[in-house]
Image (cartoon, rainbow, N blue to C red):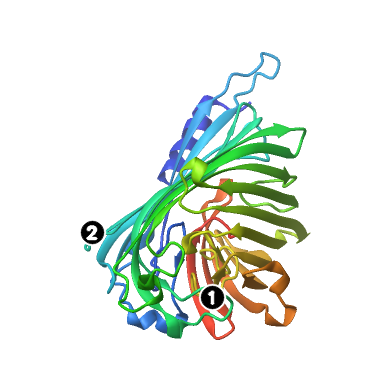
Amino acid sequence: MVSKTQNQQDSIKETEESEYAIIFYKMFFHATWNFNSKSIKDIPKTLILIICCAAFARISYAEPKQTSVKTQELAEKRLDIGGFPLVFYSDETRFGIGGGAQVMMDGDSERFSSSLGLMAFVTQNKQYTYILAPELYLDNDNYKLTGNFGYVYFPDSFYGIGKDSGKENSEDYTGRLCRINPILQRKIGQNFFFGIEYDFAYGHVSDTESGGQLASGNIPGGNGGESSGFGVNMTWDSRDNNVYPVNGSYHQFTASSYGSALGSDYTFNSYLIDVRHYRQVFGSHVIAFQGISCINSGKPSFQRMSDVSNLGKYLRGYTQNLFIDKNILVFQVEYRMPVRGRFGVVAFAGAGQVSDKISNMEFREFKPAGGMGIRFALIPDQKVNLRFDMGIGKDDSSVDFNLMESF
C-alpha cells in the first residue's frame, strides 16, 4: 500500500518538474498542430527572433478513484498538462505570439488515454489561429469523441491542382477557415468502434494575386464558400496504446457526403481508408507502417482536396499544398528508437501521389520522401512527444514541428 505522505511527495515532485530548450527554425503555420516550412533552403528568408525558451512545463493532478474494500488500495486518475509558448516573426505576419498545450488524462483502461490538444496564435497583422483537437474516451471507453474544431486566418500559398504542380506557379493569398468536425463512436466488442460524424467548413479567400488562378474564378473554392456533410466512421483499433503504440493495428474507414440539402456550396462524396500497423522490434525500438487512400468524387473546393503532405502527417519532405487533387495514395514507414532520457530519434521514408482519378495513378510517378527526426518526451508517463522532423522529397524539402507522432 502506498502511503498518503508518499503520494503527496510524488505529486509535489511531478508538479515541480520542467524542461527548458531553445528551438530555431522557420515557421509557416497551417490550420493544424503542424509548422511546415516551404523548404529547408528557404529558412533564412524568414527571421525567427526567438522561439520563446520553449518552456516545456508539466503539471500533474491526481484524482482518487473509489475502490473496493478488498483491495484497500488507492487508485489514481492523473491529469497531465504539457505546453510551450512561442514568439515568432515573418514577413507575412510580422510579430506573432501564442503557444500550444496537450492535456492528458488516464483512461479507464491501460490502452486508451483521453487527450485535449489546444493551440492559439495572434499576429501583429491581426491574423489568428485557434485549434481544439479532442480525443475523449467516455463511459469506461465505450464511447469515443474526437474531431477538429478551429478558426484560422493566416497567409498561405496556392500552387495549382494535380501531380504536375510546381513552386514556379505559386500564388500568395490569405485564407480564412472555420472548421467544426465532431466524431462520435460507440465501441462494439473489444477493438471495433462505429459511429457518425458531421463536417462543416466555411472558407474565405482574400488578397489573391491579380491574374492568378484563384482570382480567375476557375478554381473550386477560389471564391470561398461552405462545405457541409454527414458521414459514417468505422475503426478497428488493437493498439496497446493510443498515444504511442508499440504493438497492434489501427484501421479506419470513413464515408461522407456533402450537398446542398445540408447547406453545402459544394457537392461531393469523400472516402478515407487509413491502415496502420505497429511492431516492437527489440527493446524499446518500434517500427510503424501506414497506408492512406482518400478518394473524392464530385467537385470539392481546393481547400478540401487531398494533399500529399497533409500538414506533415503524410509525406514529410514536401511543401504543404504543393500537390493537391481529388484523390491520394500514400505509403510510409517509420523507425522509432529512444536515445537518452527524454530524447529519441526516428527515421522515416515513404512515397505517394495525387490524381484526379485513382485509375490515372502510375507507380513510376509516385513521389518519394524520407528523413529523420528528433523526439522530446513532453509528458513521459503518457508518452506524449514533441517532434521535430526534417524531410527531403524529390526537388523539395520540409521542416515540421508538431505535438504527437505523425501516425
Count of numbered tags: 2
Q: Residue at x 72, y 78 (%)?
A: 362
Q: N-terminal of the two: label 2 or label 1?
A: 2
Could you tell me which residue is drawn at 30 percent across and 77 percent down? Answer: 210
Residue found at x 35% / y 71%: 215
| Placement of 402 over or under 323, stated as above or below | above
In the image, is 163 to the left or to the right of 190?
left
In-front residue for pair 402/368: 368
Dot 2 falls on a residue whose secondary structure is: loop
Quarter occupied by the N terminus: top right
When asked about the image quadrant of residue 155, the answer is bottom left
At which x and y percent is residue 28?
39, 69
Please give the name of the residue rendered at 52% of the width and 80% of the height, measured from the top-left corner: 165
The x and y percentages for residue 299 are: 54, 60
Q: Is residue 270 visible?
A: yes
Q: Residue furthest top?
A: 69
Label 1, residues with CA under 10 Å away: few <14, some 14-19, many ≥20 = many
Q: Is residue 150 left or right of residue 237?
A: left
Residue 119 visible in this rendered orientation of the protein: no
Which residue is at the front of the view, 204 or 150?
Answer: 204
Label 2 sits on what residue type?
Lys
In this view, the residue in front, 204 or 216, is 216
Whether 202 is drawn above or below 386: the answer is above
**Residue where numbered disc 1 is placed:** 318
Residue 192: x and y in percent read: 74, 39
Q: Is residue 382 above or below residue 27?
A: above
Disc number at residue 126?
2
SS at mark 1 in the image? loop
The kind of residue tagged 1 is: Tyr
Q: Quadrant of the C terminus?
A: bottom right
